[in-house]
Image: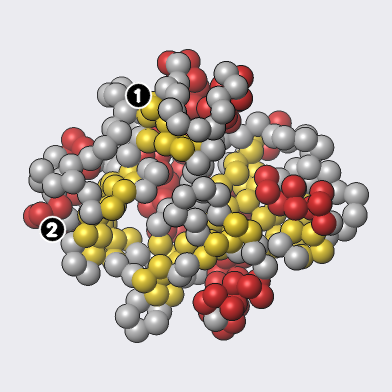
Amino acid sequence: MPTTGPLISSRVNGQTPHRQGKVRDIYNLGDRLLIVATDRISAFDYVLGSGIPDKGKVLTQLSAFWFERTGHIVPNHLISTEVDAFPHEAQGDREVLDGRSMLVRKTAPVPIECVARGYLSGSGWKDYLATGAVCGIALPSGLREADRLPSAIFTPATKATSGHDINIGEAEAGRLVGEDLVATLRQLTLDLYAFGASHAERCGIILADTKFEFGLTDDGAVLLIDEIMTPDSSRYWPKDEYRPGGPQPSFDKQFVRDYLEEIQWNKHPPVPSLPDQVVLKTREKYLEAYRRLVGRPLL
């Protein structure tokens, strides 16, 4: 598939973003937002000096794929990914926007991450080693790293503006946003995870865990927002290579993290750039995940 260099930052009609995340540039359009997914990549809480070509397109198009297919579970904020459907002030440079931007409804984001875990990995594995539980949820003894859990669990986290999100229990999440809302988000999170994990398994992929974000409309309705079940927000493992008992190969930033560990970066500025081979391998993993899950090449 032909590609150009990575898009590190965007401008729309000469305007800079109103807000920038680690990956996304966000433009405020009144009651709507324009979200442009760049090719920036972060690791160990820092945006690196190199981008991954087409990464933003994978995140946008895979999110759109899932938004379309999960509307029966919960409505979402997506209005359109078609530049022609954007308001005039958001059309800008089509070469920048095509395939990597979405017009969405503005909401009040719920200030917790809603994480579903079907396998024991990452911070959940560290928590289990220390306490025998994950976010206060007791688990059977003797589990290995990457073991499948008896059933998927809901493990909310606080949203961090910088650094790592912090795992919290469901009771703490209830104190932050209200018990009734957390109960609703818990069920939605587990239903979305079950749907995504089932589809991924048919595609030869294990969805080990994933995180969702939700927002509230002016009348209090819950909408699914941000991205959904992408390699940036999920752990995807190739099913045919799954071997519990240790870390698993994955469809995400694995090559990036491995390289940064290899060069013994101290995880403080200045941030390193990535060699071409690491960029290429990482891009291939994102594209492969997309092809398997969606069933066609990236547009």
Using the image, determine if residue 207 lies above or below residue 117: above
For badge 1, the amino acid type reads Met
Residue pictured at 83% horizontal, 44% vertical: 144
Q: Quadrant of the C terminus?
A: top left
Residue topped by disc 1 = 1
How many numbered marks, from 0 up? Answer: 2
Q: In which quarter of the image is residue 38?
A: top left
Residue toward you, 219 or 94: 219
Q: What element carries label 1?
A: loop
Mark 1, Cα crowd under 10 Å, few <14 / some 14-19 / many 20+, is few
Residue pictured at 42% horizontal, 22% vertical: 273
The span from disc 2 to disc 1 (Cα, nearest Å) is 30 Å
- Color style of the picture: secondary structure
- On screen, residue 274 versus residue 25, left or right, reads right
- On screen, residue 30 versus residue 184, left or right, reads left
Q: Which mark is residue 250?
A: none
| Foreground: disc 2 or disc 1 | 2
| Residue 34, horizontal then vertical, whole percent | 24, 55
| Residue 200, horizontal then vertical, whole percent | 59, 47
For badge 2, the amino acid type reads Pro
Residue pictured at 36% horizontal, 48% vertical: 21
| Residue 129, horizontal then vertical, whole percent | 82, 49
Q: Residue 87 carries which label?
A: 2
| Residue 241, horizontal then vertical, whole percent | 71, 31
Residue pictured at 23% horizontal, 54% vertical: 18
Using the image, determine if residue 178 lies above or below residue 128: below
Task: Pick whichever of labels 2 and 1 is earlier in the sequence.
Answer: 1
Q: What element carries label 2?
A: loop
Using the image, determine if residue 114 lies above or below residue 94: below
Residue 265 in view here: yes
Q: In which quarter of the image is residue 23?
A: top left
